[in-house]
Amino acid sequence: MVTSPEQAVNLALARAPILRSAEAGRRAAQGDLVQAGLRPNPEAKIDNQSFIASGPYRGGSPLETSLGLSQRIETAGKRQARVETAGRALALTGLDVEAARLDLVREVVRALAGAVASARAVEIGRERVRLADEVLRATRARVEAGREPLVQQRRAEVARETAAVGFERLQREAAEALRALSVLLAAPRVEISAARAAWFDNIGPRPDLAREPALPSSQLDRARLNALVDQRRAELDLQRRNAVPDVTINGAVSRLREASQTATGTAFILGLSVPLPVFDRNQGNILRAGAEVNRAEADAERGRLYLDASLTDGERRLDQSWRAADSLRRIVLPAAGEAAASAREGYAAGKFSLLEVLDAQRALSDAREQLNAALLEMQQVRADIARLRGRAATPTPASAPAGRQ
């Protein structure tokens, strides 16, 4: 039995597969960071000359045997730039994990509020059917007594059947809301108690929009946008450094033998090789990385505008839903309840017509539905605003391993 948002959130955080997926992404980025800091492996080489020969060299041992090593030396700070890029990516995945957690919290609270509102709607629909049954019984009695025409009974029957159809629809919607909540909680079945959901009815004081601060730069989504731009810039720097050729140092020891096999000797060989950047200067990767920087900067600007607009809209909706819930609960619902009760009593006494009774009942049901909808919107908007105001520490890229080439 789920009775509070805190309980539902704790269940979701302990079970939700999406969090495990986000954590796996962060561990993968940690592996990239480790790999980025590794130097190139040396290469061993052995050469035999005249391994297969003809003429006077047939059947003899090789004329020259060389055993050597080669090592590629990265230039232009490539390894440091690679580590910087991987560190930026790791910082971004850390923010992604936190964003996944906050998104899950928001969706769970919204789904739980939706399930409670659906359960309340079912109770309102059930009460609508009960009141329609009462009016139908009273109408039948008046028709049998000859005080009402038969058409009034038909009207009451239509109102009752309409209420019954609406009640069945509300039951289906409530079941769908529970299934949506169970998916978020990763549970095969979830039960809630709408009667015990005091948190759902708590509207609190009216929101003071003048005191609400704007979203700071440390806000999670802003931090993610900035971290993505930093990562793209680091990738551009890495691609520019990759345009500088690496140097390969070769060293070998050669044992030499003449064809007569009467003289041998040993030679030490040292070599240096550098690729000539004539055709491939990494132009395409640099161009792509630069375009990715421009796109990330544009997306960040658009994202910041969207976040500010979403917060403004959320605060406006919260104020509107709070005022609606407060007015409906204090003024509209009590008045509608008194009017419906008076209409039913007056109809039984012959003081009011059936149409007046149906109108009063409809007004009462509508007021209950409007209050339920206002409470639902208020709780869901609160969850949206809490998600928007989620904060995260400014990401710091992982440092490079000690020592530089």
Image (spheres, grey):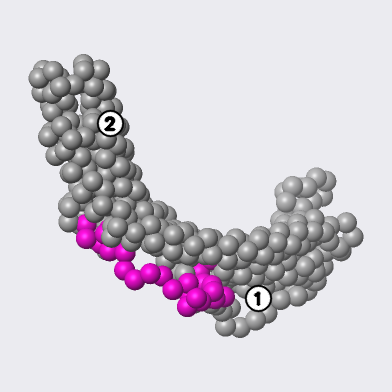
Residue linked to disc 1: 80
Residue 178 placement, left or right of 144: right
Nearer-the-camera pick, 389 or 401: 389
Q: Amino acid at mark 2?
A: Leu
Whether 108 is drawn above or below 44: the answer is above
Is residue 209 one of those drawn in magenta?
yes
Residue 152 appears at what percent x and percent y? Answer: 23, 22
Residue 167 inside the magenta-drawn segment: no
**Residue 290 appears left or right of 169:** right
Q: Amino acid at mark 1?
A: Gln
In-front residue for pair 49/6? 6
Report if residue 180 is visible in the image. Answer: yes
Q: Element type at marker 2?
A: helix
Foreground residue among 133 and 6: 133
Residue assigned mark 2: 355
Comes first in the chain, label 1 or label 2? 1
* Residue range highlighted in magenta: 197-221
Query: Percent from the top left, x then y, of residue 106?
Result: 39, 58
**Residue 342 versus residue 48 in the image, above or below:** above
Front residue (pair 19, 242): 19
Dot 2 alpha-carbon crowd within 10 angstroms: few under 14, some 14 to 19, many 20 or more: some
